[in-house]
Image (cartoon, grey):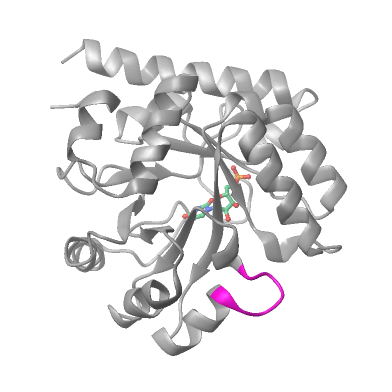
């Protein structure tokens, strides 16, 4: 049985996940915008347009060619102005000792500005402990499945990801997945590979529509090119937002 976001608030314990659900309810948006552009100015302009329609902004901060710390200061200002959180899609995948440096040091200092981060589970639970040691209230999203064709996230792998999440509930708040991977509603499902006008990109990405993603269990849909390659990103983001939220409301009604 699908629980409403309001009901989910009662079982979701991670403060960042609760904050995200409150934003989803306030803005009637479960849309995450993946702003995969490589210039700071372009990134800020896009986020300024799309901001009113999203609950979450996903960044790949290491693809920005002209990165300076001012960029994250400006992104945080936009997050406050438009009421969204920020998820740095760094996909940590190394030893605990290494990822804690990648998370808090280097030029990006991700732990000082991101609300959510994610990690591959191939390393085993040490990666979670390492990240947790240097976290500043971030929520960790574990990559249980990927949207790419031919990925190696088989059933046994997904099961291990679930167990690691269950063992680390104070830090892990959900999964990157392509469908619901658990009936435990205290975890949020973040689903990438969503696009209503394309089925793939010739490089492995496999797209589903916003309503398909929600029907398969997405709490939050992640959309990149569908929005930033459109001729009117604000209008297109609004469309994705409405399609995904309507699909969520329909799902509740059909219960
Ligand atoms: P797209 O332009 O909508 O394909 O962008 C999808 C984004 O989500 C992009 O930043 C990917 O790196 C990210 N992603 C994904 O597409 N599939 C996955 O399994 C994971 C991340 Br994990």
Pick the quarter of the image with the C terminus. top left
**Residue at position x 63%, y 41% in the image:** 224
**Residue at position x 34%, y 73% in the image:** 128
Up/down of 74 relative to 240, above or below: below
Residue 178 screen position, x and y as percent: 37, 46
**Residue at position x 38%, y 18% in the image:** 247
Which residue is at the front of the view, 7 or 145?
A: 7
Tell me if residue 201 can be seen.
yes
Name the quadrant containing residue 223: top right
Residue 1 screen position, x and y as percent: 12, 27
Residue range highlighted in magenta: 104-109
* Residue 122 among magenta residues: no
Instruction: Locate residue 214 relative to residue 75 in the image: left or right.
Output: left
Up/down of 46 relative to 152, above or below: above
Up/down of 178 relative to 204, above or below: above
Tell me if residue 229 can be seen.
no
């Amino acid at each position: 049985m699908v629980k409403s976001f309001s009901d989910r608030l009662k079982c979701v314990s991670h403060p960042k996940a609760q904050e995200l659900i409150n934003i989803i309810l306030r803005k009637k948006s479960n849309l995450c915008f993946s702003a995969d552009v490589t210039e700071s100015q372009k990134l800020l302009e896009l986020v300024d347009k799309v901001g009113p329609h999203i609950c979450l902004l996903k960044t790949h901060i290491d693809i920005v060619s002209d990165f300076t710390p001012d960029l994250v200061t400006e992104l945080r200002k936009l997050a406050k102005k438009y009421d969204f959180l920020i998820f740095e899609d760094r996909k940590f995948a190394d030893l605990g000792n290494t990822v804690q440096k990648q998370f808090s040091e280097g030029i990006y200092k991700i732990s000082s500005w991101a609300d959510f981060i994610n990690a591959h589970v191939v390393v085993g639970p040490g990666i979670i402990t390492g990240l947790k040691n240097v976290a500043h209230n971030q929520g960790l999203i574990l990559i249980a499945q990927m949207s790419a064709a031919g990925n190696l996230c088989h059933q046994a792998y997904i099961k291990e990801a679930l167990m690691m999440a269950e063992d680390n509930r104070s830090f892990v708040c959900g999964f990157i997945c392509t469908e619901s991977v658990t009936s435990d509603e205290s975890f949020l499902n973040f689903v990438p590979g969503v696009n209503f006008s394309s089925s793939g990109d010739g490089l492995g990405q496999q797209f589903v529509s916003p309503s398909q993603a929600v029907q398969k269990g997405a709490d939050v849909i992640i959309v990149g090119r569908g929005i930033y390659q459109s001729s009117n990103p604000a209008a297109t983001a609004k469309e994705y937002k409405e399609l995904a939220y309507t699909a969520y409301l329909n799902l509740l009604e059909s219960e």
